[in-house]
Amino acid sequence: MITSPFGTIGPYFPYDFVNGCEDLTQCDGHSARGEHILIRGRVLEEGHRPTRNSIVEIWQPDANGIFRHPLDPRCAQADPGFSGWGRSRTDAHGNYHFRTVLPGSYTGEDGSPRCPHINVMILGIGLTHRLVTTIFFADQANAVDDPVLNCVPEGVRARLFAERTPSLDADGLAAYRFDLILRGENETPFFLD
């Protein structure tokens, strides 16, 4: 009998794929306007086991609700100090983090108001395709009216809201926690891409 070596499904990311991408508040020698915040969390598998070396990518509008992207008709007015995009790699405990700004609201293409949110994508070992979700910000989750959030069953909507942590970080920034649970109990709602 011939034994095959143990193998893990990729992808594998070089370290320079992520290095320096966690801070969205410094861009082209400028500092972002608006309230600077921290987003921290863990990427967890079924049974709340941490995932190591997963990539969490975010993109969002600036504090005025403008995306730094040519498809946003107000792109020319975007904050020059805010990149609007970032990447973080999970450590051995599944932790990821970003320094960003509290996103502003804006009007969607269909004219409906979009509440403050951050778009999230996850790539990782064992995932056959990328996972996409959204982090929402509000004091009362049931008071939010957003077309994307309205597509999610009421019983799981609260899982898409970042939790404000009671303490500030060393720089005095407000911190939010958002765990990404890939499968199982309290799974994060993911959207088809």
Image (tube, grey):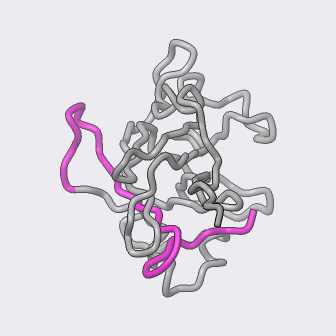
Q: Nearer the viewer, residue 127 or 103?
A: 127
Residue 19 placed where, x, y %?
50, 27
Q: Where is residue 93 drawn, in percent x and y?
A: 34, 52
**From the viewer's perspective, is residue 52 above or below residue 77?**
below
Quadrant the N terminus occupies: bottom right
Assign the C terminus to one quadrant of the image.
Answer: bottom right
Residue 59 lies in quadrant: top right
- The overriding secondary structure of the stretch rendered in magenta is loop
- Position of 36 with respect to 30 (left or right) is left
Q: Which residue is drawn at 35% across and 56% down?
A: 177
Q: Does the magenta stretch include residue 180?
A: yes
Instruction: Indicate the position of residue 113 as horizontal and vertical percent values.
Output: 65, 62
Q: Residue at x 55, y 46 (%)?
A: 55
The reply to whether residue 132 is visible in this rendering is: no
Outermost residue to the front:
1
Question: Residue 90: where, in percent of width, then height?
Answer: 44, 46
Q: Nearer the viewer, residue 49 or 24?
A: 49
Q: Is residue 102 left or right of residue 67?
A: left
Seen at 61% across and 69% down, the residue is 190
Residue 100 highlighted magenta (yes or no): no
Q: In which quarter of the image is residue 108?
A: bottom right
Residue closer to the observer: 99 or 139: 99
The answer to whether residue 31 of the structure is visible from this angle is yes
Q: What's the magenta region?
A: 166-193
Q: In this view, does 151 lie above or below 176?
A: below
Query: Which residue is painted at 37% across and 49% down in the image?
Result: 95
